Amino acid sequence: MRKEIDKYILDFENGSLKFLDEVNVHFAPTAAYQEHSMANNWSADFHRLAEKFDKIYNSLKNVS
């Protein structure tokens, strides 16, 4: 998971937003990031991060 996130960061730093849809899937309820957060007892932090991601995602994808 760490390598995958590092790749997303690198893509973003290089100006690519192609990864956004894939990351969005990972943030979906019961998907990878939520499951990982629950297993590591940081669900509250995950929910705050997911809310921020949703706002950024919607802004970048021009979703209302």
Image (spheres, helix red, strand yellow):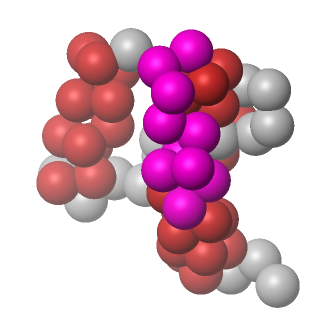
Total label count? 0
| Image side of residue 56 versus residue 31, left or right | left
Residue at image x 64%, y 31%? 34
Range shown magenta: 39-48
Residue 39 lies, with reference to residue 61, above or below; the image says above
Residue 43 lies, with reference to residue 7, above or below; the image says below
Residue at image x 25%, y 43%? 9
User: Quadrant of the image for the C terminus?
Assistant: bottom right
x, y percent for residue 61 = 64, 71
Residue at image x 28%, y 52%? 12
Note whether residue 42 is visible: yes
x, y percent for residue 52 = 53, 69
Q: Nearer the viewer, residue 5 or 60?
A: 5
Q: What is the chief secondary structure element of the magenta stretch?
A: helix
Residue 27 lies, with reference to residue 16, above or below; the image says above
Note whether residue 61 is visible: no
Q: Is residue 24 highlighted in magenta?
A: no
x, y percent for residue 57 = 59, 66
User: Quadrant of the image for the N terminus?
Assistant: top left
| Image side of residue 62 versus residue 20, left or right | right
Displayed quadrant of residue 6: top left
x, y percent for residue 32 = 62, 21
